[in-house]
Amino acid sequence: MIHAANLLSKRAELTPDREALTELETGKRYTYADLNERANRLANFMRDELSIQPGNRVSILAQNSVVYLDLFYGLPKIGAIFAPLNWRLVARELDYIVNDFSPEVLIVTGVY
């Protein structure tokens, strides 16, 4: 099956040193190889340290960052499902969504 993780892995193989992302806030630049390595590390951590299995759901409640890409590309590598949450929702809406699909892992950062 073709999914995002395959696309990033293939791009990293074809053009590893090509710039894929620049964080505007910090100026940090990531190549396709960098992003693929980050996704692999995240996938291994989720599987080995947090026991995330195929079909498990992982959510994040945060403003945009490179971590979203790590999750988007990394979780499919282990068959897990990425279910991001919108930080603009109010508490009762988030409560309903999280209780409805019960993620095995919920990542939360400073949300404004």
Image (spheres, rainbow, N blue to C red):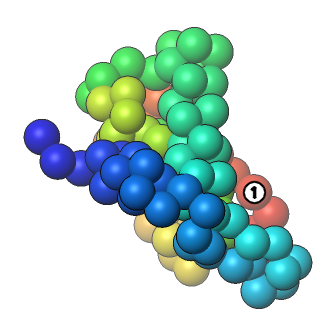
Residue 66 seen from this side: yes
Left or right placement of residue 57 versus residue 106 in this view: left
Q: Which residue is the extreme one toward the bottom?
A: 24
Q: Where's residue 69, x and y in %?
A: 53, 59
Q: Where's residue 43, x and y in %?
A: 52, 31
Q: Which class describes the residues within 10 Å of circle 1: few (<14), some (14-19), or many (20+)? A: few
Number of marks present in the image shown: 1
Which residue: 84% across, 81% down?
27
Q: Where's residue 96, x and y in %?
A: 40, 55
Front-most of residues 40 and 66: 40
Residue 105 seen from this side: no
Quarter of the figure with the N terminus: top left
Quarter of the figure with the C terminus: bottom right
Which residue: 68% across, 65% down?
30
Q: Where's residue 109, x and y in %?
A: 75, 57
Q: Amino acid at mark 1?
A: Thr
Q: Which residue is the extreme one toward the right?
A: 26
Residue 87's place in the image compared with 25, above or below, is: above
Which residue: 62% across, 24% down?
45
The residue singled out by tag 1 in the image is 109
Which residue: 17% across, 48% down?
2
Residue 18's place in the image compared with 41, above or below, is: below
Left or right placement of residue 29 versus residue 32 in this view: right
What is the secondary structure assignment of the residue under circle 1?
loop
Front-most of residues 32 and 43: 32
Q: Quadrant of residue 106?
A: top right
Left or right placement of residue 25 versus residue 55 in this view: right
